[in-house]
Image (spheres, rainbow, N blue to C red):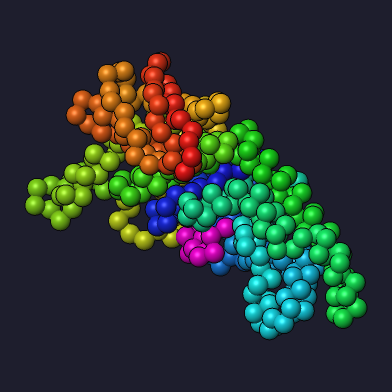
Amino acid sequence: MRIILFTGKGGVGKTTTAAATALRCAQEGYRTLVVSTDPAHSLSDALNVELKPEPTQVAENLWGQEFDVYYSMKKHWDNMRNLMLTIFRWRGVKNIVAEELSVLPGMEEASAFLWIEQYYREKTWDVLIIDSAPTGETLTLLSLPQVMQSWLTKALPKIAIKTLGSIIRRTSGVPIDKGFEELEKLFNKLESVQKIMLDSTVCSIRIVANPERMVIQEAKRAYTYLQLYGYNVDAIIVNRILPEEMGAKGAIFEKYVKSQTEYLQEIDESFSPLPIFKVNHVGQEVFGLDLLNNIGKEIYGDQDPKKIFHRESPFAVKEEKDHYVISMHLPFIGSSDFKLYKYGDELVISLNGRRKSVYLPRFANYLELDGYEFKDNWLKVKLRKGGI
């Protein structure tokens, strides 16, 4: 089974790209499920089919699903939901508010993780395509097991559950111990599916971007963090490229197309050697299988969309006694004759009058640049540890 997750800044066309990829996989003969983990579901609109919390067949070999956190909790984790409801009501929280609070921080993402774990275990599908929420939420999803376990450990210490369990059981009749057992099973499943997502032979992440400054900056940051966490990014998809003829002198998009050309070059340089797929703007709102079919063909051509397009990690962090050493593969420099500056979590490379930005993990904000070397297209940066 292959898992392909699409991420990127909100509004770049993740849903369209994910749906088009799913359709191409189905046309290749793979049993394919495309799911949306974004609370602002638009996958139904893209496929032009009303989707439900369970898989709905859209075409031959193609199914779609839009996750619903309340449906998922009721179906899979009702004991845990009752545990939370009981505790909140016992503390005097009104019923409606307690129902809302029973959806723990991260449970929307957790429901996605647990469906993924189920599908991977059952081997129902050949390809699982994930239309994820915008970049920040995707990073939350991928770091969810640690974050959620930390939150619950503070909010519901096990010793407190045991101490209060008999009281709550007598007053409410709810078997609170079963709810806590379900929580522990939840953690185990979250950790299991995280290992699946980290397996580069199973899971690939594809970043969707537009040729626009803010979008590119967020794509770079996402790429850095995904590499830092160990997730395999196997392609960049640049969506909604305007044709050059729309930038003719005096045309309404003249300035946009001119800047677009520069941004496309920046994308090529910044993300090399990742494969970069480019999609022209179709000139209309995208919904329905016919338009998705055209977009899928434009992205992948004759290539199998299920293929792992890239597996080399271009980013590594090593901790030493007094330093962090960050190694980055930067083929676009091509020369050691450059200057390097650090501003917060951003490295600025000055080369032949041009400036290139490389984003570091946020912890580097308070570290001091203490030398660097460039050899065989690898930049090694030393950051000195110090107090904040």
- Per the rendered image, the range of residues in magenta is 37-47
Q: Tell me if residue 74 comes above or below residue 222 in the rendering.
A: below
Q: Is residue 150 visible?
A: yes
Q: Would you say residue 269 sits in the magenta stretch? A: no
Which residue sits furthest top? 376
Given residues 147 and 306, the one toward you in this image is 147
How far across and down, in percent of the image, does residue 36 sit? 56, 58
**177 relative to 188 in the view: left or right:** right
Residue occupying the point 63% across, 66% down: 68
How far across and down, in percent of the image, does residue 112 sit? 64, 56
Residue occupying the point 36% across, 45% down: 217
Q: Tell me if residue 82 comes above or below residue 301 in the rendering.
A: below
**315 relative to 155 in the view: left or right:** left
Q: Quadrant of residue 269?
A: top left
Given residues 269 and 330, the one toward you in this image is 330
For the N terminus, the quadrant is top right
